[in-house]
C-alpha cells in the first residue's frame, strides 16, 4: 500500500511536469521571439505565465518532499 | 534567438513521449528551427521509428507505456544501426538515481521537465553540433 502511494505521487509529479513542459516550451518559443516579433506588453504577460509555471514546479517539488517524508515517518513508526 | 535553418538543415530528431501536447509542441517548435521531426508515443514505437528513420538525435521520455525510456535506450544501444545515435532523456522525475541510471544505460544527456526553450535548444545543439 505504501509503495502504491509513493508510486502514485511520483506518477502525479511526473505527469504534472510533462504538462508544464509543453506549456513552458510553447511560452518560451513566443517569448524569445522565435515565432516572430513580440511587443514589450506581450512579453510582460508571457513573463507572468512563465513565473506561474516556475511556482507550480516549486509546489510539485514540495508536495513530493512531503509525500516522501510521510512514507519515511510511517515506516519508522511501524518498526518501533 | 532566431531560427537558424542553415545550421539545422536536414538534421533529423525523433521525439518519443506519451504526452501528445508535448510531442506536438516540440515538433512545431523544432521544425521552426529547421529540424526534420519524427514522432513516437511510446518506447516500442520509438525503437521502430529510430531503426526506420535513423535520426541524428533522439529526445526520449522515461515513464511511458509499453516500453519505458531506460529500456528503449538499452535496446537502441544494443542495435548496430542505432547505437551511435545520441539519446537525450527528458524526465519528469527529479531523482539522482534516474540520472545515474540513464547515464549507465547509455544516454548522452538528461533534462528535467519542465525545461526552458533555451535549455532544450542548448542541449540539442551541443549533442548535434558539438557546441
Image: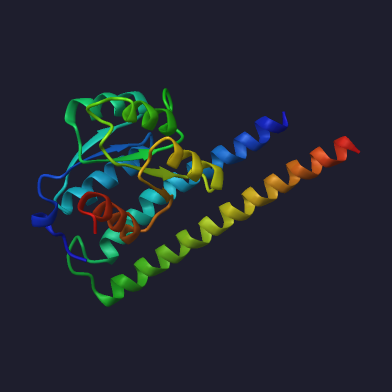
**Vertical relation: B67 (above or below) B115:** above
Point out residue A62 in the picture as x, y percentages from the top left corner. Answer: 63, 55
Q: Is residue B66 left or right of residue B8?
A: right
Point out residue B112 in the picture as x, y percentages from the top left corner. Answer: 44, 50
Q: How many numbered marks, from 0 up?
A: 0
**Residue at image coords 80%, 38%:** A75
**Vertical relation: B52 (above or below) B57:** above
Residue A8 sits in quarter: top right
Residue B119 sits in quarter: bottom left
* Residue extending furthest toward the right: A80
Q: Is residue B81 visible?
A: yes
* Residue extending furthest toward the bottom: A40
**Residue at image coords 66%, 51%:** A65
Point out residue A24 in the picture as x, y percentages from the top left corner. Answer: 38, 56
* Residue extending furthest toward the left: B6
B13 or B106: nearer the eye? Answer: B106
Quadrant of the image for the N terminus of chain B? bottom left
**Residue at image coords 17%, 54%:** B33
B87 or A18: nearer the eye? Answer: B87
Quadrant of the image for the C terminus of chain B? bottom left
* Type of colouring: rainbow
Q: Is residue A3 left or right of residue B49?
A: right
Residue A7 sits in quarter: top right
Q: Is residue B64 visible?
A: no
Point out residue B23 in the picture as x, y percentages from the top left corner. Answer: 30, 40
B9 or A61: nearer the eye? Answer: B9
Amino acid at each position: 500500500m505504501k509503495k502504491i502511494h509513493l508510486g502514485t505521487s511520483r506518477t502525479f509529479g511526473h505527469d504534472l511536469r510533462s504538462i508544464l513542459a509543453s506549456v513552458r516550451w510553447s511560452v518560451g518559443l513566443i517569448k524569445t521571439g522565435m515565432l516572430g516579433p513580440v511587443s514589450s506588453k506581450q512579453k510582460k504577460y508571457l513573463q507572468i505565465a512563465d513565473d506561474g509555471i516556475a511556482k507550480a514546479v516549486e509546489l510539485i517539488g514540495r508536495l513530493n518532499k512531503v509525500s516522501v517524508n510521510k512514507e519515511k515517518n510511517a515506516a519508522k513508526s511501524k518498526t518501533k | 534567438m532566431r531560427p537558424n535553418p542553415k545550421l539545422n538543415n536536414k538534421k533529423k530528431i525523433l521525439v518519443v513521449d506519451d504526452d501528445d501536447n508535448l510531442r506536438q509542441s516540440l515538433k512545431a517548435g523544432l521544425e521552426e528551427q529547421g529540424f526534420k521531426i519524427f514522432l513516437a508515443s511510446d518506447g516500442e514505437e520509438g525503437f521502430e521509428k529510430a531503426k526506420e528513420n535513423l535520426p541524428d538525435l533522439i529526445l526520449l521520455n522515461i515513464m511511458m507505456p509499453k516500453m519505458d525510456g531506460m529500456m528503449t535506450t538499452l535496446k537502441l544501444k544494443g542495435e548496430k544501426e542505432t547505437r551511435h545515435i545520441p539519446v537525450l532523456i527528458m524526465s519528469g522525475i527529479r531523482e539522482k538515481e534516474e540520472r545515474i541510471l540513464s547515464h549507465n544505460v547509455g544516454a548522452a544527456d538528461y533534462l528535467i521537465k519542465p525545461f526552458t526553450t533555451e535549455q532544450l535548444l542548448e542541449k540539442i545543439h551541443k549533442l548535434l553540433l558539438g557546441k
